[in-house]
Image (cartoon, rainbow, N blue to C red):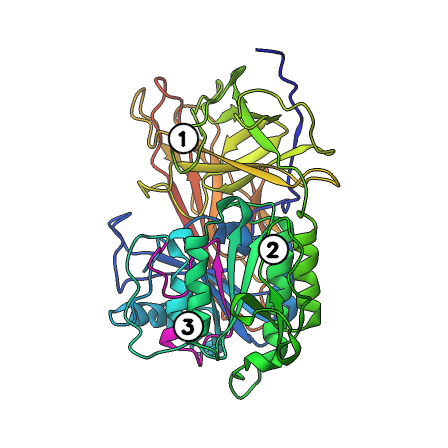
Amino acid sequence: MRRIYILLLCCFPLPAMAQVWQWSCVVDSTRSSETNDCPQAFLWIPENCKQLKAVVFAQHNMTEETMLEHPEFRKTLAELGIGEVWVTPAISQMFDFNSNDPTYFQHIMDKLADLSGYGELASAPVIPIGHSALASFPWNFAAWNPGRTLALISLHGDAPLTPLTGSGRPNPNWHGRNINGVPSLFIMGEYEWWEDRVSPAFDFIQSNQLSVITLFADAGHGHFDASDELTRYVCLFLRKAMRYRWQKNGLRALRPQSGWLADRWRKDSLPAAPAAPYNRYRGDKRYAAWVFDREMAEATEAFYNAARGKQRQFIGFIQDGKVLKPNNTHAVFTAAFRPGNDGITFHLQAFFSDSTHLAPAQATASGLLEINRICGPVKKIDDTTFVLDFYRMGLNNAKRSNDIWLLASNKGDDRFKSIVQQVNIKIPLPLKNGEAQEISFEELPDQQPGAGSIPLSAQASSGLPVSYYVKEGPAYVKDNRLYFTALPPRARLPVKVTVVAWQYGINGIFKSALPVSRSFYIRR
């Protein structure tokens, strides 16, 4: 094979630290088959939030994490007075309101409302979001309680009441329920587009003509992608939802006639009709997407225009000097976990390829390839170097704690479309071969509000360095110090902080150590 020219992998502009979730609670009303334990729910409230107006509710699948922790997404929520709840493992893929799922949900909201001091959380309007296998969750949640659903987002997901659910499970029978007046965003990526998954949405709209559903094509992107561009579009959608639907004395039901219609995505073809206010739209309304207003219509068309009529690109991967071969898995690429001498650092490279993903492309877009974390216990160090980085999910989920997903991408240019390509890496967890090791980690003292930072000094009997993550609390770890962030103004004291020390081990030399947790409180 000819020499392959490797392009530097430059990092997506992530925050300098892991995002903070100030509170968590155990969902002791149910147990998860993933962990054989109770799920945990985590709450983030903007630091400047005096009154919580709504909350985004998401569960653990994949790109929900990416979007919820995106700096621009959180900045937008902070400006709007919206918090976030993330549950791991999920309490329900489908949200079957004929079962105990509504009880589990309300249990979470009641507990977090009490813990945080933001009592309005127990009844606040909700924005459910779900990706892939959880993409029918938002629709069913809204059907259960449309009066409490501010808006919904099915992320690379499902049409309402589709027979082709991402989870493969049937939707609950709505028994005449509807989502009329609830602004809904149904997102499908260009590289996952399948008409059989989209057509049920058009059928639903025809049968429910008071629904207000934005059918959005994430042009130039794929199933595992939550790009900057898509995140900005979702942020615009949420701003519009707050402007047009939220009010102090209850949510306003939106009418289709109050918005605009825009022609459906047609890949490389121009729209069949220009976007216009609902009653003045001249295209076929059966295949049009509802949007809030002119600004939303123009943002949608600008997104499509950035990919329209351009050449497609492809990406391949190289590990240990060898080109990875694509496979028939959901990931398309599977890389081995081959760490260096420290047991946790590994390397991966990406290159612009031809359509086989094996040979270099003859021509490519300007700009570099980027590589990002989608989800899983991993952190980027530099252009081709990654390291294990466990976090609040914990190390005991046999399905997810050992599962790393990365995404290589290029934003395209005037000639080429943007392109994304995911890769999956499984890690052995725990390591069972080698000498046993233990972690010693002294108790941490309580702190007062306004504390700056404290040192972390756990030790492993192996002599290997110990790493940390914050499971809950207004704090983050950097360079073996725990730094505290500002508390929201109505935070109820004391606030619990839990830090977990871990040492993964070196396969064949040292086993994984049992993680050690230390909790303390921020109190006056």
Q: Quadrant of residue 450?
A: bottom right
Residue at the (64%, 73%) spot, across then down: 282
In this view of the protein, which residue sits in the foreground, 118 or 439?
A: 118
> Does the magenta-highlighted stretch encompass residue 162?
yes
Q: Position of residue 433 (x, y in %)?
A: 30, 21
Mark 2 burial class by Cα count in 10 Å: few <14, some 14-19, many 20+: some
Q: Pick whichever of labels 3 and 2 is earlier in the sequence.
A: 3
Query: Residue type at mark 3?
Result: Ala
Give, as a three-letter code, the residue at label 1.
Answer: Tyr
State the residue position of label 1.
504
Q: Dot 3: what SS?
A: helix
Contact, mark 1 vs mark 2 (Cβ under 8 Å): no
Determine the CA span between mark 1 and mark 3. 42 Å
- Prevalent SS, magenta region: loop
- Say left or right for 477 vs 506: right
Quadrant location of residue 489? Answer: bottom right
Q: Position of residue 447 (x, y in %)?
A: 53, 57
- Report the magenta residues as a range: 142-165
Query: Which residue is tagged 3?
Result: 142
Against 381, is 322 above or below?
above
Asked if the residue under mark 3 is in contact with the one under mark 1, i.e. CB atoms within 8 Å, the reply is no
Q: Is residue 207 magenta?
A: no
Q: CA distance from mark 1 to mark 2?
A: 33 Å
> What kind of element bears circle 1?
loop
Mark pair 3, 2: CA separation: 22 Å
Classify residue 472 as left or right of residue 438: right
Question: Of 306 and 116, which appears nearest the observer?
Answer: 306
Which numbered tag is attached to residue 478?
A: none
Q: Which residue is mark 2?
A: 231
Q: Residues within 10 Å of mark 3 (few under 14, many from 20)?
A: many
